[in-house]
Image (tube, grey):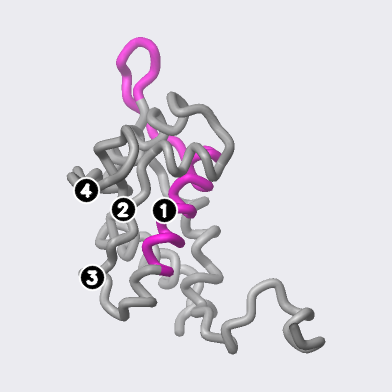
Amino acid sequence: MSNESKRYVFNDNAKWSKVILCMPYVLREIEISIKDNKGKSHKTNLSDDERDFLLVVIMAYDMNALQYKQADECITMLSYEDIARQLKCSRSKAYRICSRLIENNLLICSNKDNRKGTSKSAYIPNVETLQKHIKNYLEKYPEYKI
């Protein structure tokens, strides 16, 4: 490893986009609906765990999409078990987070017949919904526009 590359945590010759830079802020502004114990729905922002969870899925998906240059060729789909392992949380917590993100149209569940292991479902980001959130954020903060 050269001395120059040791200066960076991640070096891809400055190919990171401004959208990637603002993604954590976009996720902070997303509001979701949740139901309380009485079944009444109310709006709230994503929790820290939900943001982390969604960011892991988005980054895995985008990383693979960039490798293949087209998102429709993207084959990376993470199960809630994969994400639970990465985030070091219980499977039940990961499942609850997945369910909430699906209910709020931020994740898409895809059954993948050829997945290894016990999990039959895998998750990818809902690109269309997330792009709308990114667009809304960039309209409020034009300095991040590419």
Q: Label 3 belongs to which residue?
A: 73
Q: Residues within 10 Å of mark 2 (few under 14, many from 20)?
A: many
Which mark sits nearer the N-terminus, 1 or 2?
1
The magenta segment is 35-63
* Residues marked 2 and 3 touching at CB (< 8 Å): no
Quarter of the image with the C terminus in it: bottom left
Quarter of the image with the N terminus in it: bottom right
* Residues marked 1 and 2 touching at CB (< 8 Å): yes
Residue at 39% across, 34% down? 43
Checking the image for residue 114, the label placed there is 4
| Marks 2/3: CA–CA distance | 13 Å
Residue at 49% across, 63% down? 23
Which is nearer the eye, 111 or 104? 111
Q: Residues within 10 Å of mark 3 (few under 14, many from 20)?
A: few
At which x and y percent is residue 119? Answer: 31, 35
Which mark sits nearer the N-terminus, 2 or 3?
3
Residue at 28% across, 55% down? 126
Secondary structure state at the residue bearing disc 3: helix
Please state which amino acid type lies under the numbered disc 3: Glu
Residue 34 lies left or right of residue 48; in this view the side is: left
Q: Label 1 belongs to which residue?
A: 57
Checking the image for residue 117, the label placed there is none
Disc nearest the viewer among 1 and 4: 4
Please state which amino acid type lies under the numbered disc 1: Val
